[in-house]
Amino acid sequence: MDEIRRRIFTRELKAGAKVDPEALGSELGMSKIPVREALSALVGEGIIELIPRRGAFVAPMSKRDIEDHYWMLAVVSGRAAERAAETLSESALTELEKLADLMERAATESERDQAAFRFHSLINHAAQSPRMNTVLRMLGTPLPLGLYESHSRLAADADAEHREVLAALRSRKPAAARKAMERHFLEGARASIAALEAQGFWDEPAT
């Protein structure tokens, strides 16, 4: 799924392009079944369209679509952080501190991405709401991991936002935790759109 998402946002697969599960599976060294499952999951993210009797196609995506996706993540993740401020154990807070440290000193994008994923997952699960976690899984990852946080300035911004969330959680301030998490994702929308613009994601193809 991550590879399909990456290809879409790097324009290897452009809006309107048909995605052949069998051909893509062969290219990736897997059967078409997991590819079809990934495509179905990406429908929930608004990245893929399944058209009856025609197949899977890359969905057109506007800047507003990106903003809306991050807004939904901001609202649900903010609610999860609000709950987590009251339920996180001291050991979990210590683990979040370690993950924040790891993100800041990560030597590779992969290390940073993994630490960020664990950071948010720990908070989300601490909310103790299966329904919210189901929604967050459905929303998925809006952009390929590392697309914008790999830029040093934007990575530093994200680090500061994670520290703000952590401070609110450690202080047991639910409202502050919610607002900090919402800001984090809304800033993510701004940064992601800027990164996509810089890559020419919405540029018209040359004729």
Image (cartoon, rainbow, N blue to C red):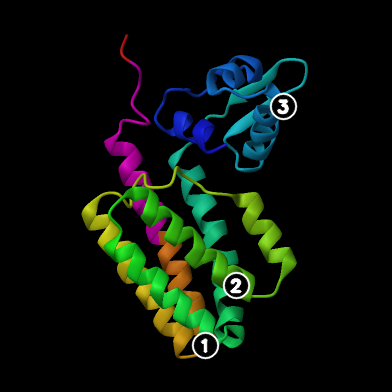
> Compared with residue 84, is residue 37 higher up or lower down, i.e. above or below?
above
Residue 59, by quadrant, is: top right
| Label whose residue precedes the other's in the sequence (3 or 2) | 3
- Residue flagged by tag 1: what amino acid is it? Glu
Left or right: 185, with 152 as reference point:
right
Query: Percent from the top left, x then y, of residue 141?
Result: 53, 49
Query: Percent from the top left, x then y, of residue 143?
Result: 46, 44
Pointer 1: residues within 10 angstroms few (<14), some, or many (20+)? few
Residue 162, by quadrant, is: bottom left
- Residue flagged by tag 2: what amino acid is it? Ala
> Compared with residue 138, is residue 130 higher up or lower down, i.e. above or below?
below
- The furthest residue to the right: 53
Look at the numbered disc 1 and give the secondary structure of its residue. Answer: helix
Query: Percent from the top left, x then y, of residue 180?
Result: 43, 74
Q: What is the CA distance from the residue labelled 3 to the residue labelled 2? A: 33 Å
**Eye-nearest disc, 3 or 2:** 3
| Label whose residue precedes the other's in the sequence (1 or 3) | 3
Query: Percent from the top left, x then y, of residue 204?
Result: 35, 21
Q: Residue at x 58, y 79 (%)?
A: 84
Q: Main secondary structure of the magenta part?
A: helix
Q: What is the CA distance from the residue labelled 1 to the residue labelled 2? A: 17 Å
In magenta, the rendered stretch is 187-205
Residue highlighted by disc 3:
33
Residue 122, labelled with which disc?
none
Residue 34 versus residue 167: which sits nearer the camera?
Answer: 34
Residue 142 among magenta residues: no
Pointer 3: residues within 10 angstroms few (<14), some, or many (20+)? few
Residue highlighted by disc 1:
90
Residue 127, by quadrant, is: bottom right
Residue highlighted by disc 2:
80
Left or right: 149, with 79 as reference point:
left
